[in-house]
Amino acid sequence: MQNTKDVVVIGGGLAGLAAAAYLGRAGRSVALIEKAHAPGGRAATQESHGFSMNLGAHALYCGGAAHEVLGDLGVRFTGAPPPVSGAFALDRGTFHTMPSGALSLLTTGLFGLAAKVEMARVLGGLAAMNPAPLASVPVSAWLRDAFRTPEVRRFVGMLVRVTTYCADDDRQSAGAALAQLQLAFAKGVLYLDGGWKTLVDGLRGAATAAGVEILTGVRAARIGTEGGAVSFVELANGERLGAGAALVAASPRAAAALAPESPALAAHAERAVPVHAACLDVALSRLPRPSFRVALGVDRPLYLSLHSDSARLAPAGGALFHAVQYGLAGRDAERELEDLLERAQPGYRDALVERRFLPSLVVSNAVVAAEGGGYAARPGVRVPDLDGLFLAGDWVGPTGMLADASLGSARDAAGAIVARGARRPLDRAA
């Protein structure tokens, strides 16, 4: 490995891999440093007994920035939308048919007559709502002021949780949440065949083909500067990699720790509030109740979905469920998720093959907060007080949430680095 690179990328999740691939295609010499023994981060997939288990529930938004970037880089994947039949809403202890159209809206016991009328109006007008005036409005205030009946407020709140993975209604921007909800309704989402490792493998392949050196099991200790500009990246073992630029694809706190000379990064780390969820991932040898595939909590921040019904994630006859409690988990989160699964699939323990509980998974590194104006409060890809330092991740830039933010900011950061000392433009996949 050369001791000096045009760019050192720190972090081997989706954002780091994508940025490195773009930079390599633009003629930059790139080293990517990943502290784990394999790249992927939260997009890793565990293979066991023929099941492909993501770290909690994952869905790729169609038509978003992630979809575009994966196409740019030639990453191929297949998948299908979540199941529609066998979907139920859980409200105050009772399962109701999930309204998915005019007939089910009329027949579901989830709403009274006034709420059914309002819900029909809301669903019909959702696409025409303007998110921009709501950027600085918390979701809780929007739900209170925009919807008349309590049932509709709870139901729209549930839709917000499911599409944003965030239950922090007092902090999350209603404008950002509405835009995410509109994307989901307009374009839909996919559960991916083989899990999200297909994206990790594809991005790693794109980066390697572009000449990127990927170093796993290597931890960056700090980003060194000279004259206010990036000069090198020091590793935990004391070795230094010379760098014309550095791109940090990690959390706000990790970025601030790597570059303590940057007040801007320290401020973003101080403000960032991560989005957490408790996740129960369960692989079954058979499906005890085939007619029950999805349950979404209306009055509780709960989610349950049979991902293997749509995507190739289980062996023949098997079933893979992901259950989620959104937000910081209480002491009883695991029991509540087990109880939800038992109600949906009675006797599931008799068919249990694999079980994994993640009590506090970081879903996103920062809530898109109403305070500061939603996406406007996010940092840009260029760190303003350190020349040659750039950022990418789900907390960076003006583009979307979750993987859309990660991959959108990766593309933008790579473009900014190339523009800083242009050789040739970012290549697209043939």
Image (cartoon, rainbow, N blue to C red):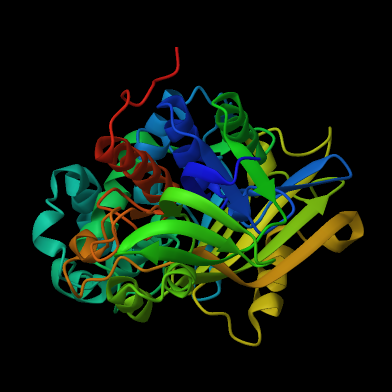
Residue 24 in percent (x, y) is at 48, 30
Residue extending farthest to the front is 227
Residue 5 in percent (x, y) is at 50, 42
Q: Residue at x 29, y 65 (%)?
A: 228
Residue 133 in percent (x, y) is at 8, 60
The front one of 155 and 382 is 382
Q: Residue at x 21, y 53 (%)?
A: 122
Is residue 59 visible in the rendered image? The answer is: no
The front one of 401 and 424 is 424
Residue extending farthest to the top is 430
Residue 51, placed above or below residue 164: above
Query: How many numbered discs, if any?
Result: 0
Tell whether 312 sits left or right of 265.
Answer: right
Is residue 155 visible in the rendered image? The answer is: yes
Tell whether 290 sits left or right of 422.
Answer: right
Residue extending farthest to the bottom is 331
Residue 211, placed above or below residue 110: above
Residue 212, placed above or below residue 357: above
Query: Where is residue 7, by image quadrant?
Result: top left
Q: Residue at x 63, y 54 (%)?
A: 34
- Looking at the rendered image, the quarter that the C terminus falls into is top left
- Looking at the rendered image, the quarter that the N terminus falls into is top right
The front one of 106 and 276 is 276
Residue 288 in percent (x, y) is at 80, 51
Tell whether 66 sits left or right of 380.
Answer: right
The front one of 202 and 315 is 202
